[in-house]
């Protein structure tokens, strides 16, 4: 386990909030702020600058995705969205606004641990992209391509996510191309194999 994280939890159901909080603390992290509506979550995130935000999607005043969008306009904080059900459209919307992971209730401590690890790995990738592209908006766009390319490699080569990422990074180094360019090439190549 790396260094303990300072985490903001936004959840409007008291019992869920307490459950998340105790799991996060059990994993050795610190809950630095709690919010029960989306607007408060945005204010607290900007004020406390946590290392990570875990936010329920259905929040009063401002829904979770909107709240994360507002936060990210000010400072980009890695975020995990929590939802009561799996919904492709919501996942797409969340990804577009920079959400790095999506958790479905009920959540146990193992789910949270995995979510935190993946989110931080994706955030590290994102930060590198941001440095490379010098622009948050471009980095968000690029991330969509990289996630898709990773998915293709995972399917076609039966790889786990970290291995797929390593494979993309190696291709990027070997061909001296930006990661996002390699990702687009993988996506294009994959289209050739789609025999509709």
Image (tube, grey):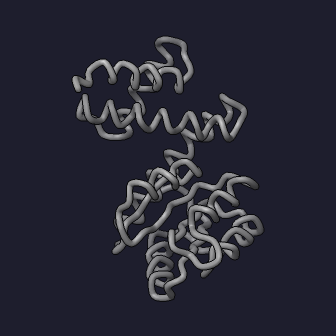
Q: Nearer the viewer, residue 64 or 112?
A: 64
Split into 4 quadrants, where in the image is the C terminus? top left
For this rendering, which residue is in front, 168 or 96? 96
Give the residue at the far front of this rendering.
196
For the point 59% across and 68% down, the residue is 7
In-image side of 72 versus 26 (left or right): right
* The quadrant where residue 77 appears: bottom right
- Evaluate whether residue 32 shows in this view: no
Question: Viewed as shown, does residue 76 lie left or right of 119?
Answer: right
What residue appears at the point 54 percent right and 16 percent down from the top-left corner? Answer: 177
Q: Is residue 154 toward the left or the right of residue 183 in the image?
A: left
- Look at the picture and state if 24 lies above or below 167: below
Give the image quarter of residue 195.
top left
Residue 85 in the image, given as x and y percentages of width and height:
36, 68
For residue 79, what is the image quadrant? bottom right
Residue shown at the point (58%, 69%) measured from the top left:
63
Residue drawn at x 46%, y 26% as measured from the top left: 183
Task: Point out residue 53 in the picture as x, y percentages from the top left corner.
Answer: 58, 64
Residue 117, above or below 132: below
């Amino acid at each position: 386990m790396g260094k303990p994280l300072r985490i903001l939890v936004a959840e409007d159901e008291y019992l869920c909030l307490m459950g998340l909080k105790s799991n996060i603390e059990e994993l050795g992290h610190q809950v630095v702020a709690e919010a029960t509506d989306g607007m408060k979550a945005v204010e607290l995130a900007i004020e406390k600058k946590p290392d990570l935000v875990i936010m329920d999607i259905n929040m009063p005043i401002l829904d979770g995705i909107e709240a994360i969008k507002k936060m990210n306009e000010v400072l980009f904080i890695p975020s995990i969205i929590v939802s009561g059900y799996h919904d492709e459209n919501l996942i797409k919307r969340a990804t577009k606004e920079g959400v790095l992971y999506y958790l479905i209730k009920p959540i146990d401590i193992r789910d949270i641990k995995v979510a935190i690890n993946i989110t931080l790995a994706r955030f590290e990738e994102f930060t590198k992209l941001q440095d490379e592209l010098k622009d948050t908006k471009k980095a968000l766009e690029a991330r969509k391509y990289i996630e898709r390319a990773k998915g293709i490699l995972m399917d076609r080569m039966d790889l786990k996510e970290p291995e797929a990422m390593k494979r993309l990074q190696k291709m990027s180094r070997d061909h001296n191309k930006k990661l996002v360019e390699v990702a687009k090439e993988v996506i294009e190549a994959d289209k050739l194999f789609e025999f509709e």
